[in-house]
Amino acid sequence: MLSIQRRRNRIVVFFALTCFSSSIYAFGYAMEITRVVPELIKFWSKFEYTGMPFISAFLFLFVLHFVKSGRRVSIFYIIAPLLISFTILMIRQTNPLHGLYYSSFSFENHAGYMLMTFGKGPWYWIFAGFNILAILSSSVLIVVYLFHSSRLFRKQGGLLLLGTFVPIVPYIIHVTGIFHLAVDIIPAAMMFSTTLFFVAVIRYRLFYFIPAGRDWMVETMTDALVVLTRQKLVVDANPSAQRVFGSEGVDPIGRVVSEVMPLLDPELEPGKRIKTDNKVWEVNRTVLPSRRGSLEGVLLVAHDVTDLERLAREDMLTGLLNRHSWNDAADTELSRLTRHSRYGSVIYLDLDYFKKVNDTYGHAAGDAVLKELGQILKAGVRRPDLVGRYGGEEFVIFLPESDTQGAAEVAERLRADLEAAVIEIGEEKIKITGSFGVAGSLVTMGLNLETLVNQADKALYEAKHAGRNTVSFYS
């Protein structure tokens, strides 16, 4: 944020310098054409050139920082135009020594005004080319910005483009002499441009929004942002929102949100979580008031909380479901089986002599054993099966659509895989076994998860008493 604020400050600085250098030029020229003494005319001509060479340079830098707000501007693009402007200033102010800017001076009386006329040297034309290039470059930058920016900021950009382009025609007329004008009309054009800039600043809050910076930040952020009107029409949606909640190839702008982004309900409670594909999003709703305090619209911000959701659901060591999440998921699955009168089973397992592993090899070795067991369990079950760490070295598996016999076969396969596994800790090779208890039943209205878990726990107790490293099922 500090970096963005610094770049915003640069925009303000270059805008102020553009206006200040234009003011020097306009004031100096006004004093020049109202003098009648040649020496005073020359003095004020020199004075106006303390600002004139920098106008187009500051204008270019102002526009460049505006359209690239939020992104770094290369130091080259700052130094180069300022160096050219300073060189032109020095050559103009030392012109009596070399005549490279003005090749000759003369004074003529026009309608009572003593005006200075001059021959144009090579550096005069270099300055003319530099001015035209800087103004055209600024105009092109704004046109590109307008093409890519949100429609909310088109008026600001349009005023900037008009204010930037206004001086170019009077300048070309003045430099080329296409039309013979006794006075220089460029200062008047510059004052008109400055007025347009001030309208953009005051009326459309140019520096308050810094729209190019807004565009860059909002367009690249991973959070999904959607702005709705009171009628629930989409007036703005960043790429993340369109990618996650929109339909491919459908522009949501100006459409009812329920038609183009049906998952985003404007009446969602704050903090409501919704799922899309493999992502979980937390949606927050902010009312956008008008200046009079009435409802103007709604801002919906969806934040990706997939990782937080996963951390809340999973056991951090093994990557399996934690006890709370396993209970919730198994309960949900049990309810589905109840409605359709299908079978469901629970496998309850406990590592044999796990305390001995911790005491002999240390807790790091114990953690490695638990991680290895987690991998074995995940690899040995079906996708719909729910595997969780119930606590310590105890693990549970819920197998929907599986009776006691089928669950016992799964448990036996897992027991064999665990017995065959070798966990290497440094030079140590650790082998371990587990005892398994199985309980299954046709799921009816009277059966709950706690009952199945208790039955599997009793079967596990029998397996322990039968010598461990075996499978026992509840009967």
Image (spheres, grey):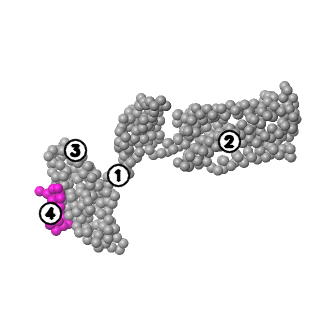
Instruction: Tell me the number on the disc at residue 310.
Output: 1
Name the foreground residue: 279 vs 328: 328
Residue range of the region highlighted in magenta in the rendering: 454-475
Which of the two discs, 2 and 1, labels the residue nearer the N terminus?
Answer: 2
* 471 is within the stretch colored magenta: yes
At x 24%, y 50%, the residue is 330
Which of the two discs, 1 and 3, labels the residue nearer the N terminus?
Answer: 1
Residue 178 position within the rendered picture, expressed as x and y whole percent measured from the top left:
78, 30
Residue 56 position within the rendered picture, expressed as x and y whole percent measured from the top left:
70, 40
Specify the amino acid type for callout 2.
Leu
Instruction: Tell me the number on the disc at residue 336.
Output: 3
To which residue does mark 4 refer?
Answer: 462
Residue 7 lies left or right of residue 80; in this view the side is left
Q: Residue 46 appears in which quarter of the rendering?
A: top right
Q: Secondary structure at mark 1?
A: helix
Name the foreground residue: 309 vs 140: 309
Callout 3–callout 4 Cβ contact below 8 Å: no
